[in-house]
Amino acid sequence: MPDRLTDAASASPPMGIGWRHPHYRELLERRPELGFLEVHSENFFAQGGAALAVLEQARAHYPLSLHGVGLSLGSVQGVDPWHLAQLERLVRRVEPVRVSDHASFARGPFRGASVHAADLLPIPLTREALDVLCANVQQVQERLQRRFMVENLSSYLSWKADPVDPPLLEPDFLSQLAQRTGCALLVDVNNLYVNALNARAAGAPGDPLQRCLNWLDAIAPAHVGEIHLAGHCRASDEFGDIVIDDHGSRVCPDVWRLYAYAVARFGPVPTLIEWDTDIPALDVLLDEAARARALAASRDGVSA
């Protein structure tokens, strides 16, 4: 099976930004120096139209990374055939450097029908769930004829532990996925930090930053195909406080520190700046990408 992650072996990692509608025209006119653009796959499933035409214009100047939110890789119902067919058609059309989705589920049976939750829901980190995820990821890779990437999730609920099939630790779960299927891991550093902060709020012991460093230490560098960076926010209501991975602000200092550590551990891995809500001027995203580039170039890392 072809491995399309070859740019990860270069001396300086490609830096990309999430390309969203408010920046379509400006980016094509300015053509700033970037290693790649990431778009959400599902936004370009139509077989024609303005969106696909704009994407093909971008493809003439930049490598593309397709990042999905709807494959529902953890679903026991399997991958939706229509969704996979649209993804395959898009992949063949734009020839992206990387294709990815999340270690999550969205599809399931409800009142006799198959429904889609339109959300990224966490899967139990059990061996049974791992079997399902592996089978679905392998199906996607065989259909696309390329190595796929799977992202760790920011989650806001957890499954009750089953004493018959106790859960694995998340890095062990994802490492086994990579080993069994040959897929790559898309490490979202902000998701790690959001989960660690919420775990502390729920009473988990230990320092959230150290919890993230331990997670990164448990992942083999050979399994990592891309890194995501983003901002998050805090929300409060009568039920308490929560940190939300909203992709609506600059990367915070602790996530930058985690990124420096990740680069020192994993090497020159392609890195993306995600920004999906309260989208600022394009120059703000380019500034974040420049900071990531500078950190990756120094590769000094952070000691645990």
Image (cartoon, rainbow, N blue to C red):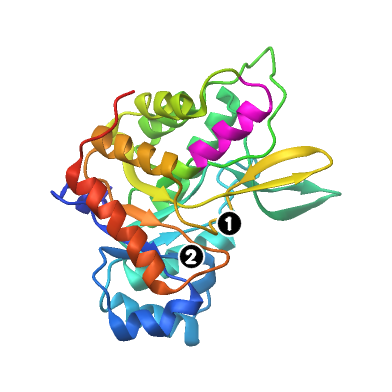
Q: Are marks 1 and 2 in contact (CB under 8 Å)?
A: yes
- Callout 2 environment at 10 Å: few (<14), some (14 to 19), or many (20+)? many
Q: Please identify the quarter of the rendering in which residue 160 is found.
A: top right
Taking the magenta stretch, the answer to whether it contains residue 176 is no
Taking the magenta stretch, the answer to whether it contains residue 196 is yes
Please, which residue is most extreme toward the top here? 163
Main SS, magenta region, reads helix
| Residue situated in front as seen by the camera: 45 or 232 | 232
- Does 137 appear above or below 173? below
On residue 70, the disc is: 1
Please, which residue is most extreme toward the front here? 253
On residue 41, the disc is: 2
Residue at screen point 51% across, 59% down: 84
Task: Give percent across and percent down for residue 59.
Answer: 31, 75
Q: Amino acid at mark 2?
A: Ser
Q: Amino acid at mark 1?
A: Gly
Q: Is residue 165 visible?
A: yes
Q: Please identify the quarter of the rendering in which residue 274 is found.
A: bottom left
Task: Give percent across and percent down for residue 26.
Answer: 38, 83
Task: Give percent across and percent down for residue 99.
Answer: 39, 56
Residue at screen point 30% across, 39% down: 260
Task: Give percent across and percent down for residue 303.
Answer: 29, 25
- Does 252 appear above or below 43? above
Left-right relation of 262 to 158: left
| Cα–Cα gap, marks 1 and 2 | 9 Å
| Residue situated in front as seen by the camera: 108 or 102 | 102
Q: Secondary structure at mark 1?
A: loop
Q: Is residue 187 visible?
A: no
Q: Earlier in the sequence, mark 1 or mark 2?
A: 2
Task: Please report the bounds of the magenta region as a residue range.
Answer: 191-204
- Callout 1 environment at 10 Å: few (<14), some (14 to 19), or many (20+)? many
Residue at screen point 58% across, 43% down: 104
